[in-house]
Image (cartoon, rainbow, N blue to C red):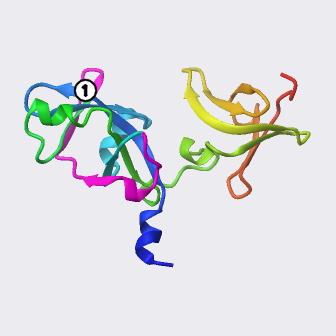
């Protein structure tokens, strides 16, 4: 197999997206999905891509971050070569990603959402509830959206509802009534 193809098909992790412009000199507002939100400024190198493309390296273009800061409730960044509002407006909606291998290693019993989405969710009794299709932050705790014969929302509370996460087997085991 061609090494270039291997590199091009490696997965990327979406960290956020450009949601608006700030001022007239090409600065962009960023919606960050990192915790804390400003952590996105420390990760990289950044890759930009359309939200409509598959999350693999070949669909994303590298970009350097010239500067970034917290501005009120927003994160504001500047990119080299983007010097006016019109240029910046052309980037609104672009996804900000990094190569999966550039992600910092997670702490024990913590997982990146990108590692969890797509896993099968099963009860302690072995009932298959479906695939985890989305994670949501609710304030109190994160919530899994699981789609099988129907859609369920299950709190992602490790130890209480989430009993095991086996990334190698692709299974999350939950203490959850399969009829609920």
Depicted 101 relative to depicted 115: above or below = below
Taking the spot 89% from the left edge, 42% from the top edge, the residue there is 126
Q: Is residue 54 left or right of residue 162?
A: left
Q: Is residue 67 left or right of residue 98?
A: left
Which quadrant holds the C terminus? top right
Residue situated in front as seen by the camera: 176 or 180: 180
**Residue marked by disc 1:** 20
Taking the spot 43% from the left edge, 35% from the top edge, the residue there is 33
Q: Please provide percent x and percent y for residue 103.
A: 45, 54
Q: Residue furthest front?
A: 52
Queried whether the magenta region covers residue 60, the answer comes back as yes
Residue stretch rendered in magenta on the structure: 52-74
- Residue 34 position by quadrant: top left
- From where the camera sits, is residue 60 visible? yes
Q: Please provide percent x and percent y for residue 49.
A: 35, 46
Q: How many labels does the image show?
A: 1
């Amino acid at each position: 197999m061609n090494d270039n193809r291997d590199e091009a098909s490696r997965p990327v992790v979406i960290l956020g997206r450009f949601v608006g412009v700030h001022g007239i000199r090409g600065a962009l507002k960023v919606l960050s999905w990192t915790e804390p939100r400003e952590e996105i400024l420390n990760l990289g190198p950044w890759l930009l891509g359309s939200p409509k493309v598959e999350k693999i390296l070949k669909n994303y273009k590298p970009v350097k971050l010239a500067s970034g800061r917290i501005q009120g409730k927003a994160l504001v960044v500047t990119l080299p070569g983007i010097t006016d509002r019109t240029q910046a407006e052309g980037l609104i909606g672009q996804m900000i990603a990094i190569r999966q291998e550039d992600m910092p290693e997670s702490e024990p019993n913590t997982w990146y959402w990108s590692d969890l989405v797509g896993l099968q969710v099963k009860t302690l009794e072995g009932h298959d509830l479906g695939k985890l299709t989305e994670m949501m932050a609710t304030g109190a705790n994160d919530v899994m959206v699981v789609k099988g014969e129907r859609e369920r929302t299950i709190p992602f509370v490790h130890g209480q509802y989430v009993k095991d996460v086996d990334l190698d087997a692709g299974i999350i085991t939950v203490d959850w009534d399969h009829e609920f």
